[in-house]
Image (cartoon, rainbow, N blue to C red):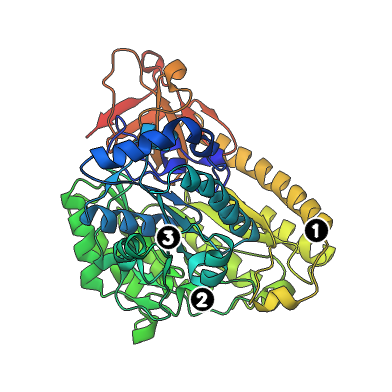
């Protein structure tokens, strides 16, 4: 994801409310934090003293990957805090004054794999300076490469799979007792992660998992191998979690699933997801509902109708295209074709004209010709996505596509550059259409890198666009979770700016 599309709180996974109660998480788009390793010489000795002095061991969770991983990190934090750990402050992270580092990993692309081992190499320096420091590795790479991790990084104390979050503290205790690395990676899901304690990364927004795993067989994807077959939670459990979130002050939930709209298919109820959306619409105090990511093959008219008629379901849709070529879609084993995809977009826009639609696209997939790539370019021109996450194909060992004839790296990069330039142009045009219009923003961050100068706060509008807002002189400042309706005054490719001047007729209204 382009970092311009994210607030600092979203990049770091921190609830940026006066430095408060949020899980410290780094997104996959953040550069590796060298400050931890750079500061080791002066602070590691202090860490030894602090561990003996403080009441609770301090943890830090570093997350690589998708929203599902970030949500898993909330569960990891919950399990740790239930066992007596305390979340590290930003200052403790910067000074490497922590007792436990958990690296929650991603296996979707090769750069995430490389980054994991590079990060573990940095942590080895910390471990050498502070032998009492414990290091744990979880997530999809732990599920996939458990043996390789222990061989290449023997300083790691615990390796736990995507289905073993609840075992983390027991593994850490055993590693400390035996002075040997502990590994637990289950192949079958024994309990939904949602049954575990949770430390939410935000005071205003929450992820709620409705299913885990994936039943699709996309030839490029490692997810089914590391997340397992799709399993749905019961609707009552999901709604109870949403209600609990709202009772604690959460204003917005995002329903999560690898293929969120295939929810219920295992039990034969193809309308289960639209029913769930409508049920969320009846939860008092729930202001906004989002979901990610739907699969085009399971995107049915009842879901579109539920989006259009349920007031708190936001006019936002992220639906992966992957390629505009039917030939490549077949090679990817994606169970839809380009015309079906475009028909869904047309149907959504027919009833939600202002819907903000984003997507994922892979370029340089094995066998992709220039003609296939031009079909993708044509599809992007036709679809006019608000934004697109574009990736150069990365072969994953164990997937069918990894054994296919590969597109040369320079060709794939050239296609990435051309497609990115096209999408940037479209994004700028779409975002410019908001200038002069009023948007409603839920505030998610009060302090960013430039806020001391601009006096702006940040949040998301109903369509999911990032908006930076300057509070007019003499007007009340919002808090995280408040809603501001204001006039957009500027735009860029991936964000909007609202510097409203009420004296000139611009709008600035605060709602709590």
Query: Quick one: label 2, few (<14), some, or many (20+) residues within 10 Å?
Result: some
Taking the image as drawn, is residue 282 in sight? no
Going 27% across and 31% down the picture, which residue do you hit? 479
In front: 168, or 274? 168
In the rendered structure, which disc, 2 or 3, sits on the residue that comes first in sequence? 3
- 283 sits left or right of 69 in the view: left
Q: Which residue is mark 1?
A: 409
User: Which quadrant of the figure has residue 192?
Assistant: bottom left
Q: Which residue is mark 3?
A: 157
User: Which quadrant of the figure has residue 220?
Assistant: bottom right
How far apart marks 1 and 2 lie (CA) works out to 26 Å
- 82 sits left or right of 35 in the view: left
Under tag 1, what secondary structure? helix
If the image is split into quadrants, where does the C terminus sit?
top left
Query: Quick one: label 3, few (<14), some, or many (20+) residues within 10 Å?
Result: many
In the rendered structure, which disc, 1 or 2, sits on the residue that comes first in sequence? 2
Q: Can you say whether 291 is above or below 5 in the image?
A: below
Q: Which residue is mark 2?
A: 224
- 120 sits left or right of 201 in the view: right
Dot in front, 2 or 3 = 3
Q: Can you say whether 365 is above or below 84 in the image?
A: below
Going 57% across and 72% down the picture, which residue do you hit? 222
Query: Quick one: label 1, few (<14), some, or many (20+) residues within 10 Å?
Result: few
Under tag 2, what secondary structure? helix
Dot in front, 1 or 3 = 3
Residue 54 x %, y %? 23, 39
- 259 sits left or right of 145 in the view: left
Going 38% across and 48% down the picture, which residue do you hit? 132
Residue 273 x %, y %? 35, 71
How far apart marks 2 and 3 lie (CA) works out to 27 Å
How far apart marks 1 and 3 lie (CA) works out to 37 Å
Going 38% across and 74% down the picture, which residue do you hit? 263
């Amino acid at each position: 994801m382009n970092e311009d599309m994210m607030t600092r709180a979203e990049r770091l996974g921190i609830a940026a409310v006066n430095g408060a109660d949020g899980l410290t998480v780094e997104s996959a788009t953040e550069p590796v934090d060298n400050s931890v390793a750079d500061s080791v010489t002066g602070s590691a000795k202090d860490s030894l003293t602090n561990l003996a002095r403080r009441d609770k061991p301090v943890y830090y969770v570093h997350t690589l990957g998708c929203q599902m991983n970030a949500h898993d990190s909330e569960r990891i934090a919950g399990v740790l805090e239930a066992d007596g750990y305390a979340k590290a402050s930003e200052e403790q992270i910067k000074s490497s004054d922590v007792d436990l580092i958990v690296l929650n990993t991603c296996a979707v692309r090769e750069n995430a794999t490389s980054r994991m081992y590079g990060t573990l190499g940095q942590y080895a320096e910390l471990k050498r300076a502070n032998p009492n420091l414990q290091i744990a590795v979880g997530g999809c790479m732990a599920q996939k490469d458990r043996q390789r991790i222990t061989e290449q990084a023997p300083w790691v104390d615990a390796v736990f799979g995507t289905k073993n979050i609840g075992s983390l503290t027991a593994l850490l205790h055993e590693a400390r007792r035996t002075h040997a690395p502990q590994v637990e990676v289950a192949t079958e899901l024994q309990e939904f992660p949602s049954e575990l304690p949770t430390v939410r990364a935000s005071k205003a927004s929450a992820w709620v998992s409705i299913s885990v795993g994936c039943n699709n067989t996309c030839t490029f994807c490692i997810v089914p191998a590391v997340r397992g077959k799709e399993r749905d939670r019961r609707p009552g459990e999901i709604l109870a979690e949403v209600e609990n979130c709202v009772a604690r002050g959460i204003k917005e939930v995002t329903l999560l699933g690898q293929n969120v709209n295939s929810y219920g298919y295992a039990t034969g109820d193809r309308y289960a997801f639209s029913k769930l959306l409508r049920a969320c619409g009846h939860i008092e105090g729930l202001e906004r509902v989002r979901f990610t990511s739907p699969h085009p093959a399971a995107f049915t008219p009842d879901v579109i109708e539920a989006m259009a008629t349920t007031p708190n379901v936001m006019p936002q849709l992220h639906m992966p295209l992957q390629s505009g070529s039917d030939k490549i879609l077949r090679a990817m084993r994606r169970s839809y074709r380009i015309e079906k995809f475009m028909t869904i977009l047309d149907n959504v826009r027919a009833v939600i004209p202002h819907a903000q639609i984003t997507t994922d696209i892979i370029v340089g997939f094995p066998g992709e010709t220039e003609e296939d790539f031009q079909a993708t370019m044509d599809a992007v021109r036709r679809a006019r996505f608000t934004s697109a996450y574009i990736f150069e194909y990365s072969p994953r060992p164990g997937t069918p596509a990894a054994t296919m004839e590969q597109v040369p790296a320079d060709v794939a990069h050239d296609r990435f550059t051309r497609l990115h330039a096209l999408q940037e142009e479209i994004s700028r045009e779409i975002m410019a259409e908001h200038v002069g219009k009023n948007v409603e923003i839920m505030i998610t961050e009060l302090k960013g890198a430039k806020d001391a100068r601009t006096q702006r706060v940040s949040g998301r509008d109903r369509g999911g666009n990032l908006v930076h807002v300057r509070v007019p002189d003499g007007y009340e400042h919002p808090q995280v979770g408040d809603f501001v309706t204001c006039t957009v005054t500027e735009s860029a490719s991936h964000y909007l700016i609202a510097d409203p001047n009420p004296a000139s007729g611009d709008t600035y209204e605060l709602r709590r």
